[in-house]
Amino acid sequence: MCRGILLLASFGIRLTAAEPDLILKDGRIWTGDPAQPWADAIAIHHNRIVAVGDNLQVAATAGPNTRVIELNGRLTIPGFDDAHVHLIRGALRPTRVDLSGACSLSEMQKRIRDYAAAHSKETWISGGGWDYSCFPNRALPTRGDLDAAVKDRPAYLVAADGHTAWVNSKALQLAGIAKGTKFTGAGKIAEDAFGEPAGTLSGAAMALVHKLVPDVPREEKLAAIEQALRMFSSLGVTSIEDMGGDDETVALLDELERQHKLSARVAVYITVSPPGSAEAVDHVIELLQAHRTSLVRVAGVNLVMDGQIAAHTAALLEPYTDATGAAGKLLWSPEAFNEMVALCDSGGVQVATHAVGDRAAHVVIDGYEYAHRANESHDSRFRIEQAETVAAADVGRLARMGVIPVMIPVLADQGAMESWSKELGPDLIKAAFPWHSLEQAGAHLVFGSDWPSGISADPLRGIHTAVNDWIAGQRIGVEDALHAWTVNGAYATFDNRNRGRLRRGMVADVVVLSQDLFEIPPAQIAKTRVDMTIFDGQVVYTRQ
C-alpha cells in the first residue's frame, strides 16, 4: 500500500508519509476532545500530534526510527495550563529571603537574620512569602518587628499574595516616608496609633519603596526563570499565563526562547495601573503585534481591581465580620475602569482583571458589559482573575456574557476556609469559590495556581481541592476539573485551536500520571504524581 498518503477511512484517521518521532502506546489516554474522548495511543512528529487512536492504528504509522514509549495503562492527558502565575516574582523568591512556610514572627526574624548574615555585601534585604494568617488576630507586622531582625540595612519583604510589603525603619527613611506622609493613589501607608508609618505598604504604595530596591542582575533572572520552568515541567505544566508582566518579562522570555531554554508556552498579560491611558494601551498593542511566536505571546492587559481577603483589602458588598466597618476598596473607579476596558477591547487587547471580593467582581462585570455594548459582535473573552466571591446574581450574568472565571482552587484548601469563615461570616462563605455554580451557569471555568502566592503550584493539588467537598455544593467532577486545567485554559488565551487537547494537528504537550484520577477515590488525588511531561514533542521531565 502506498505510504505517500494513507487514509484509514474506517477509523477516520489520516496519516502522512512522515514517520512519527515518538509513539506513546498501551495507555488510557484522556484527550479532552469530545469527538474522540479516549484513546490507547498517540503518535508525534516533530512538535505535532499526527495520530490518535487504538494501538493497532497508531502502530501502523511507525517507521524504523520511531521511538516507542510503553505507557502500561497509565492515565495520559494534555499538558496542564496554569492560567495565573507571577513568573519572575516566583522565580526569584528562592534566591532572596524566603519566608514561605514560616508561621511565627520568631521564625521569620531568624530567616531574615540568617540571610542578612550570609549576604553581608547586599545593600538591601529583600524577598517575601510571609502570610497574614501567621500574625495574631491578623494584625500586620510592624517596622519594629523587622528592625529587630535587620536594622543596619533597608529591608523590603512582600507578602505571599504580592499585595502588601513589610518594610523596616531604614527603608521608610530612605523613601522619605514619615509621620504625616500621605498617599492618594490606589494603595495605603499603614499608620500606628500615633500616626507614624507602621511598617506596611499596600497596593500602589508599595512602589514608594520598591523603586529603591536594587534590581536583580539579568543573568540571575534568566537562570531563575529557567529553574522555575523546570519546576513547572515536573508538575506537568506545559503552558502558563504570567499575570503582571512588563517589557522586561517579555524580553527575558524572548532571550530564553532564542537560547532554546523554554520548557513551557508563556502568555504574558501586561499590568496597567489606574487610571490607565491610551498610550499604555498603544504600547500593549505594539507588544502584541511583535510577540506572536509559538512559545512567547503577549496576550493582553492585567488590571487589578482589589486586594485579598486575608488583608481585608478585597472589596466586599458587606463589611468583614471581624473588622468593624471594613469592606475593602476598589483600586479603579468604575468610570475609569469602564473606559479602560472599552479602549482595550476596541484595540483588540484582551482584558484580565483581578477581582477577589464580590463588590470588585460586580464592578468588573459592569465594566465588561459596558465595553460589550459598544462592540457586541467582538469575541472579547474577558477574564476575571481569582473570582473568590461572586454574588449569586452576578454568576449568571458573568456566564451569559462569556466572561471567563480564572480561579485558584488551592486557595480553597480546608484550612483556609476555616479562617475565611471568621472573616466573611456564614452567609458570604457560601458564595466563596463558586466553581460548580459558574460551570452550571455555562461559564468556561479555568484554573490556575497563583504561584508563588498560592499554597502549591501543583495542578493535581488544585484538582484534589476542586473535586473534594471542602465547600458545600461546589464540588465538581474529575473531568470538569481536567477541562479547567487544559482545554479551557487554552480557550482563555485564544489558543484553543493550537493546544489543550490531544487531537491530530495540535501541539504535542502531553502528561503521563502515576494514578488514574477517574478510578481512584477522590481523597487520593493529591497523592498522584507526574511520571512524564512531553512539551512541544520533547520529553522534558521523567520522574525518577
Image: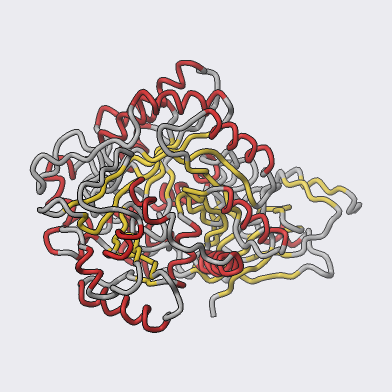
Is residue 265 in sight in this rendering? yes
Rendered image quadrant of residue 388: top left
Determine whether 132 is above or below 145 in the image: above
> Residue 11 in the image: x percent, y percent?
70, 46
Q: Looking at the picture, tell me which residue is in the foreground, 313 or 203.
A: 203
Determine whether 208 is above or below 224 in the image: above
> Residue 30 in the image: x percent, y percent?
54, 54
Q: Looking at the picture, tell me which residue is in the foreground, 374 or 435.
A: 374
Is residue 517 in sight in this rendering? no
> Residue 52 in the image: x percent, y percent?
67, 53
**182 with respect to 462 (left or right):** left
**9 with respect to 116 (left or right):** right
> Residue 191 in the image: x percent, y percent?
18, 51
Q: Looking at the picture, tell me which residue is in the foreground, 160 or 532.
A: 160
Rendered image quadrant of residue 324: top left
**339 with respect to 539 (left or right):** left
Identify the residue shown where x is 53% and y is 53%. Answer: 240
Identify the residue shown where x is 48% and y is 70%. Answer: 514
Where's the C terminus, which quadrant?
A: bottom right
Identify the residue shown where x is 30% and y is 30%. Answer: 362
Determine whether 141 is above or below 436 in the image: below
Look at the image and name its color scheme: secondary structure
